[in-house]
């Protein structure tokens, strides 16, 4: 029987982590994602599934605890919000360089700096371009519903272990704080030590005897070997790009103009599109679900069929750069965005369509 509950997006993250059989959560409170840690503390999974839940002394400590747990093959995670994730960037780069699976949740707030506690999508560059140092990528999932907040926990962990790379759920503050009905997944059993050793032969726990011990590190002083490591990372990224692009299309079969939006903004744009179609205008939308790997090929295909593209984002214009790369000059690409925690309404999206494409309503 399905279990349906009404909860916030942040709460859904916590419930889904327990039901996935996660081994550990290490975090630090910051608005607007504090309910993840608060919900885990309330549910006390250490008494039921054995999951470790720990409030670290800082964001830096939390990500390094994740690094340690991931090095042993455990399914571990952290969550934070924009400036907190900035503090975690060194540790995230270490995770990528050590080829360790981990799940990172970023519920975005406005910036730069301490900014505002209101919602934003201005961490797009930080998440998709590798906010830390070095040539690396994260798998980045962008939920637009509370259900997807829950679903992407399992998906993020599974992809992280499949490719031995960190994955991030990049949610804006609206999705983190909104309440919707959620179908919770079945409870999974946590893996045993023997299962972890078998599934993760690379882990620091080794083979279970003293004859072999793996050393997990991101340091390599031999330049030739470090280049080999980087080439291996890039091969993994190309494999992810080939196999893991996710997106949704809405009304694109006959669309004359295309909107590209992600997260909560895609929901606002969908209402604008329905209003536009009621007025006789053929507008469609593509919603990237994976911000990395980005659906370049799919947007390129649609760019050859429409008269113009509008990206709508809660930022000054970040995803628009990837959309322009995908369109490759086939069509004009414009950006409409709000900042400072101000969320546009469907009417403002229609006004932006009219401004750039003279689609009058």
Image (spheres, rainbow, N blue to C red):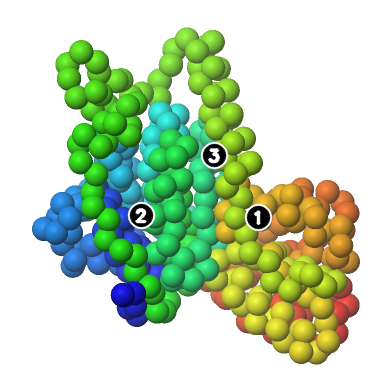
Is the N terminus in the top left, top right, bottom left or bottom right quadrant?
bottom left
Residue sitting at 18 percent across and 59 percent down?
A: 45
What residue is shown with label 3? 137
> Which mark, residue 87?
none
Packing grade of label 1 (10 A; few <14, some 14-19, many >=20) is some
Residue 193 image point, x, y percent: 20, 36
Residue 180 image point, x, y percent: 41, 79
Residue 157 image point, x, y percent: 39, 48
Packing grade of label 3 (10 A; few <14, some 14-19, many >=20) is many
Marks 3 and 2, the one that precedes in the sequence: 2
Is the C terminus in the top left, top right, bottom left or bottom right quadrant?
bottom right
Query: Quadrant of the rendered structure where residue 3 is?
Result: bottom left
Residue sitting at 18 percent across and 67 percent down?
A: 42
Left or right: 21 in relation to 116: left
Residue sitting at 23 percent across and 49 percent down?
A: 190
Q: How far apart are marks 3 and 2 (CA)?
A: 18 Å
Marks 2 and 1, the one that precedes in the sequence: 2
Residue 235 image point, x, y percent: 59, 29
Question: How many discs appear?
Answer: 3
Residue sitting at 19 percent across and 24 percent down?
A: 208
Query: Quadrant of the rendered structure where residue 211 is?
Result: top left
Instruction: Decide which of 98, 205 is in the foreground and name it.
Output: 205
The reply to whether residue 71 is visible in this rendering is no
Element type at mark 3: loop
Q: How far apart are marks 1 and 3 (CA)?
A: 17 Å
What residue is shown with label 1? 318
Marks 1 and 3, the one that precedes in the sequence: 3
What residue is shown with label 2? 79
Element type at mark 2: strand
Packing grade of label 2 (10 A; few <14, some 14-19, many >=20) is many
Q: Distance between the residues labelled 2 and 1?
A: 22 Å
Element type at mark 1: loop
């Amino acid at each position: 029987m399905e279990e349906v509950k009404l909860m916030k997006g942040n709460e859904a993250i916590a419930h889904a982590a327990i039901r996935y059989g996660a081994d550990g959560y290490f975090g630090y409170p910051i608005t607007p994602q504090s309910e993840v840690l608060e919900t885990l503390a309330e549910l006390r999974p250490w008494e039921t599934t054995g999951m470790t839940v720990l409030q670290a002394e800082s964001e830096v400590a939390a990500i390094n605890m994740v690094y340690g747990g991931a090095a042993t093959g455990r399914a571990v995670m952290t969550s934070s919000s924009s400036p907190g994730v900035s503090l975690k960037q060194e540790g995230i780069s270490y995770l990528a360089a050590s080829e360790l699976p981990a799940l990172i949740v970023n519920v975005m707030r406005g910036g730069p700096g301490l900014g505002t506690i209101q919602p934003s999508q201005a961490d797009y560059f930080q998440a998709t371009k590798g906010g830390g140092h070095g040539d690396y990528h994260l798998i980045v999932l962008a939920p637009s519903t509370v259900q997807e907040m829950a679903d992407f926990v399992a998906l993020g962990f599974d992809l992280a272990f499949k490719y031995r790379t960190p994955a991030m759920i990049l949610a804006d503050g609206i999705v983190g704080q909104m309440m919707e009905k959620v179908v919770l997944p079945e409870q999974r059993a946590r893996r045993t030590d023997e299962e972890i050793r078998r599934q993760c032969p690379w882990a620091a726990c080794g083979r279970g005897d003293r004859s072999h011990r793996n050393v997990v590190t991101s340091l390599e002083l031999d330049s030739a070997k470090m280049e080999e490591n980087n080439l291996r990372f890039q091969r993994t990224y190309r494999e992810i790009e080939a196999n893991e692009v996710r997106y949704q299309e809405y009304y694109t079969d006959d669309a004359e103009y295309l909107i590209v939006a992600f997260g909560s903004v895609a929901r606002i744009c969908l209402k604008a599109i329905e209003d536009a179609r009621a007025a006789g205008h053929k507008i469609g939308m593509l919603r990237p679900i994976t911000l990395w790997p980005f659906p370049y090929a799919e947007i390129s295909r649609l760019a050859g069929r429409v008269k113009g593209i509008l990206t709508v984002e809660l930022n000054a214009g970040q995803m628009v750069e990837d959309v322009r790369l995908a369109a490759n000059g086939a069509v004009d690409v414009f950006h409409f965005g709000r900042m400072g925690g101000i969320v546009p309404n469907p009417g403002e999206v229609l006004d932006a369509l009219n401004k750039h494409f003279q689609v009058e309503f």
